[in-house]
Image: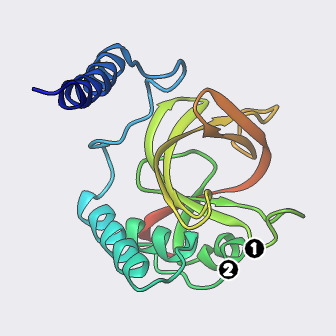
Amino acid sequence: MTKRVVRKALGRFSIFAVLALTAACARQPAGTADIQIGLPEGIDLDKRAFALREVDIKHQNGQRVWCVPFARNASGVQIRGDAHTWWGKAKGLYDRSKTPQPGAVMAFASTKGMTRGHVAVVSKVVSPREIMIDHANWVRNKVSLGMSVIDVSERGDWSAVKVMSTPGAYGKTYPVNGFILPEQSDS
């Protein structure tokens, strides 16, 4: 073997060894242990799968992904229009609550920076003041599954929340109208 072939082989082996050791030593960043990507309890996994397939189709066609169609497909709550209108439109059609439940749509109020509001689907209730959500377009044109949200309202009524947009770091406070339950109201 020539020196060049040996150096090339050693170079490839070195890169492989470094990558293997890095992967073996890698661990999840602090604060992300509860982020779930697998099978959350209490939500309709068929609807979630349908919503994710629709996102794939949009991406393949070069289209944007928005929170409203994703939440509608993932929850079964059949409301149309900008996210900030969902809370009002749900009245009389769907039960609404101030308490999160898996499968419910969390309706963010509009803000100066989020003029159209935002909607997300509760995938898990972790504690009385923390939930996980599945939603689209929080990160531009992407779907986030199992993102942590904490209730920071003074009364513990979920009227103000922070979303963990970066592992281990919660962002600014956002107002929330409440939770729209996926079963249609009897009233």
Residue 42 in view, yes or no: yes
In the rendered structure, the answer to whether residue 111 lies left or right of residue 163 reads right
Residue at 30% x, 72% y is 53
Residue at 36% x, 70% y is 51
Residue 26 horizontal/vertical position (percent) = 39, 19
Q: Nearer the viewer, residue 104 or 5?
A: 5
Q: Nearer the viewer, residue 3 or 163?
A: 3
Residue at 58% x, 77% y is 92
- Disc 2 from disc 1: Cα separation: 6 Å
In the picture shown, does residue 18 fall above or below 177? above
Which disc, if any, is residue 116? 1
Which disc, if any, is residue 165? none
Residue at 72% x, 33% y is 156
Residue placed under numbered mark 2 in the picture: 82
Q: Amino acid at mark 2?
A: Asp
Residue 132 horizontal/vertical position (percent) = 49, 41
Q: Which residue sits furthest front?
A: 2
